Image: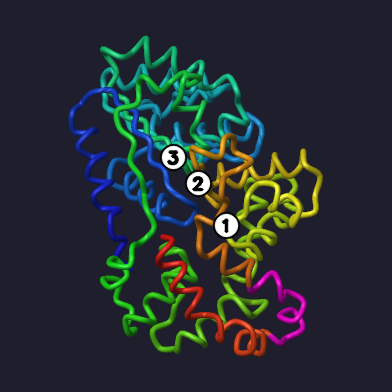
Amino acid sequence: MNFVGRAEIIERIQSRIAMGQMSLCVVYGPHRSGKSYVASQLVRRHKAIYLAGRMANESVHVADINRALEERFVPANAQDKFEPVETLHEAFVRLFESSVKIPQTVVIDDYPFLVEAVPQFPIHLRDLLETYKDTSRLNIILMANGMEQLDGRIIGNRSLIGPFVSEYLEVKPFSLVDMKSLGLHYAKDDLRTVFAVTGGLPAYVQYFDNGESIDTNIINLFFSVTGALFEETQYILHRDMKNITGANAILTGLASLERPYYVELLQESQIKSGTFTSRLNDLMSMGLVGRIQASSRGNAKYADYHFTNSMFHFWYRYVYKYWGDIVRGYGADVYYNHVKPQLNDFVQAACIAI
């Protein structure tokens, strides 16, 4: 698939690398938007070290980077041995020191997860950036899902490394215009449908089979227990949250209401207010829920809440609601009886909103 817009981001980063100076770039965008494609291209083209932040302790991340460092810094003398590092701080000291002589590139995917696992890492990174700012040729690319997720970690008054960021680069979902250049052999209205039910996210769009109708594709992807998108939302929530019960309640409530206020959404969700606030903040940090704050309404409790990801909207409005029927093998019936009669209205609203 043609990853529209990703080449430009890769070229911008490559231009930074070509300067031969230390740089820190931030690449952000929603789940499945193509950040991994950007990372893989940088790793391949520049032999970059890749480190994936994840919900694990520091020892797991240290093991990952030791494998990467061993591949990069194999001793010239066969009798010598690679000396593994014991901490991430030690690993990055080695990277900064080596970059004084030879340019190095490192990609840290899901950087916020790394910070959760190793809270002191931003402090160490700030100190190294300051120490080596005039001599290092280390290019660091940090990746995350959204700007709210970066707040306090990279941007904002609480950020330790924000002053060192050279550039923020956003990987956006495909637009309606982009959809026309992807090679899908569908009419304009059908492309709008694909756009609406996938949120324009490349990883989801690529599941659509040109040889099948839109109806068949949607049934196969969403309304079958073996469908690639049947449990996708649950995978994403589990990936970023320890307990997704409250998130499911909020998203189900949001799918049944039209731009509700805080209190309306709280009542519809039927969960405790403390849990509601925490999970709602999580969903906004993940870029799945947004709010429009009218200046005349005061605090956030009087904002309008809405889905910012139309695939999630579609899923909670139709898939989660009829989960039991789909599991029992009646997914096609659900689609033709409950979804298709409303699909045009959903698509129109999604295209206007996005």
Residue 145 is one of the magenta-drawn residues: no
Which residue: 47% across, 18% down? 160
SS of the residue at dot 1? loop
Compared with residue 276, is residue 105 higher up or lower down, i.e. above or below? above
Q: Which residues are magenta?
A: 318-330
Q: Nearer the viewer, mark 3 or mark 1?
A: 1
Q: Which residue is mark 1?
A: 259
Which residue: 44% across, 27% down? 155
Figure quadrant of the N terminus? bottom left
In the displayed structure image, the side of residue 177 where residue 108 appears, left or right: right
Colouring mode (rainbow / by chain / secondary structure / one colour): rainbow
Three-letter amino acid code of the residue under disc 1: Arg
Quick one: 222 or 228, which is closer to the camera? 222
Residue 322 image offset from top left, x and y in percent: 71, 76
Q: Which residue is mark 3?
A: 143
Q: Say whether disc 2 or disc 3 marks the residue closer to the N-terminus.
A: 3
Q: Which residue is mark 2?
A: 292
Residue 207: numbered disc = none
